[in-house]
Every structure is written in structure tokens, then in C-alpha cells.
Image (cartoon, rainbow, N blue to C red):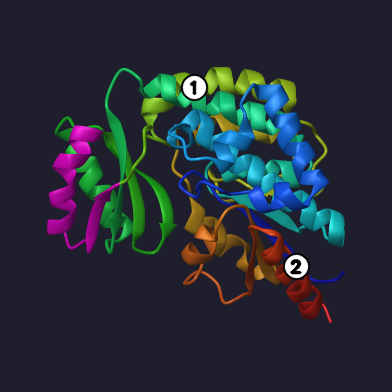
Amino acid sequence: MSIKCAFLFPGQGSQSVGMGQDFFNNSEVAKKLLIDASVRTGIDFSSLLFEENELLGQTEYTQPAILLVGAMAHKLFTEETGIKPVLTMGHSLGEFTALVASGALDAVDAVELVNLRGQLMAEACSKQEVGMMVSLGLSDEAVEELCAAQREAGLQVWAVNYNADGQIVIAGIKKDLELLAPMVKEAGAKRAMLLDMSVASHCPLLASASAPLEAKLKEMLKDDFIAPVISNVTAQAYNTKEEALDLLPQQLVKPVLYKHSMANIDDEVDCYIEFGNGNVLKGLNRKATKKPHFNVSDMASLEVTIAAVKELDV
């Protein structure tokens, strides 16, 4: 196949009850992956994913759940098509699923790894009330200047997710974010909304999580990349274990350069395929690319995407 596909994977916030159930019900491959992940971690993923519960919103469970469903979708697609990506990319947590798609992480190892990542993040934030807030309609520079000015005034707030033009997520201490929200609106934002998050991702508040995550990465990462991964930290490609060991611990405390990554890769690909629940990244990418964007979130979308990609390759 001559078509050049980028494989994309969403991060935290894309979860919903019932995700992955269609794969589980209709694929022995998906069922085995879920069972193996449950045995490895001690998490009952069938209950976590398919039944109403409070755990799915807790980051140490959210992260492995999202990764597992993305890995299911990716495995079913590649087993049926044999298509390999020219590059892989994920948003935040999704970078770990991208490593699975690139061959640098075993899927079940990755589920265990991000379960630990979630635990470390929760522990780092456990002694203070933290949160995240989305700003809509302000430039990067305006948000950065507001955050910098408020840090000088003693608040702990950072611009952390550069999702799209005019959409930035800010992380920090919750009461500080509440103080910042009206300032963001006064500066011209269309909206400043606190998100339902129990951690403050990609900022210095997570510094204590970096070293133990790096230790686990050393055990699990392989130097078997079949395609480069785009780093959230640099918006550039990497394809070695050594680079991953440097970049992934930094990802905990540095911003996600998602829109910058899209700008850097768009000329290199013919289409995007998003694997996992929903199509969050398709929404972010509307202004970033005119290339076709497909998603694989259940068996029906799997078949639609396979047919669409084959048609593009004619």
C-alpha cells in the first residue's frame, strides 16, 4: 500500500462507559487483550469499561482503560489490513498508545505502565486540590502572559495543552484556576471552563512522578520502532528507546504541543486514522488539516475506515 497514514491516539477525557464493548463482543483478539490486561493489573476491565462506575473517572483507571481500547482498535485494524503507519502520535496519554502502535511497547505492558503513571500522578497531586481549565478564544501568547503574571503574584497556574488555535488548557491549583478564570474572560476569551480532572497534568506539580515512571519505562520499552513517534514535548519525531526514556518523563511536567505536532507532520501524510473511543482528535484537527481523518472506535467504524483507506489507495 502506497498511502501514507498517521496513526493517532486520544488522551484522558475521551473515556465513556461502554467503550470497547463492541470489540470485546465481536473479536476474540480484543477479548484476549482485555483478559490479559485484567490478569496483569488486577483491574476488572470488563466491569470498568462496560458498567456504570466511579472508577473510570479516576486517573489511575482512566489511563489504562483508554489505552486498552485504543490498543484493541489498532490491533484489529492492523491484523485485517497489514497497514503500517509512517508515523504515530498521541495526545498526552495517547503517546503511550502510539508507542504500542510503533512496536516499542507491548500492549499489556503499556496498560500496566499507564496504570502506574496514573497512580504516580494521583499521588503527586494528593496533598493539594488541583485542576485543569480550558481557555477558548485567546491566543497562546495572551494565555501564557496571563499565567506568567499570576505566577509572579504567587499563583500556581501553567498553560499545558496547546490543542488548537484558540484552545489551550491550563493546569494548576484549583483555587488559583478559579481566580484566573475571570481574568481569562476579561482578556477576551469566549470561555474559561474548569474541567472534570483530578490531576494537574503537564506542569511542575507532577515532578515527583518523573523518576519512578522512568524506572518502569527502562524495564518495558523496546528498541523495535517500526515507525517514529511524535513527542508531545518537542513536536518532533523520535524512534529509539534512549530518546523515549528522555522524553516521556519530561512529558509529565511539560506542555503537550499537539497543534505544533500537527503542523509539523501534515505535509508528510495522506490521511489520519484515530484509534480509540470517539473522535476527539478529529475535532481538534478540523482547522489543522484538510487531509482525510478516519476513526476506529467500534466494529462498524473499523469496516468503514478499512474501506475508505483502500479507496484512497486506488
Q: Amino acid at mark 2?
A: Glu
What secondary structure is found at the residue carrying circle 1?
helix
User: On residue 120, which mark appears?
Assistant: 1
- In the rendered image, residue 186 lying in the magenta stretch gets the answer yes
Is there CB contact under 8 Å for labels 2 and 1? no
At a point 27% along the width and 52% down the height, the residue shown is: 143
Q: In the rendered view of the protein, which quadrant contains the C terminus?
A: bottom right
At a point 67% along the width and 25% down the height, the residue shown is: 217
x, y percent for residue 131: 31, 36
- In the rendered image, residue 221 lying in the magenta stretch gets the answer no
At a point 62% along the width and 62% down the height, the residue shown is: 265
Query: Could you tell me how far apart the alpha carbons at marks 2 and 1 are, in whole angstroms?
Result: 37 Å
x, y percent for residue 284: 47, 63
Q: In the rendered view of the protein, which quadrant contains the N terminus?
A: bottom right
Main secondary structure found in the magenta portion? helix
- Which residues lie in the magenta part? 174-194
In this view of the protein, can residue 104 be seen by the observer? no
Up the image or down, 245 lies above or below 296; here it is: above
x, y percent for residue 125: 36, 24
Q: Amino acid at mark 1?
A: Leu
Residue annotated with mark 2: 303
x, y percent for residue 249: 55, 29
Mark 2 packing: few (<14 Cα in 10 Å), some, or many (20+)?
A: few
Nearer to us in this view, 57 or 10: 57
Mark 1 packing: few (<14 Cα in 10 Å), some, or many (20+)?
A: many
Query: How many labels, in total?
Result: 2
User: Left or right of 265: which side holds 30?
Assistant: right
Nearer to us in this view, 54 or 13: 54
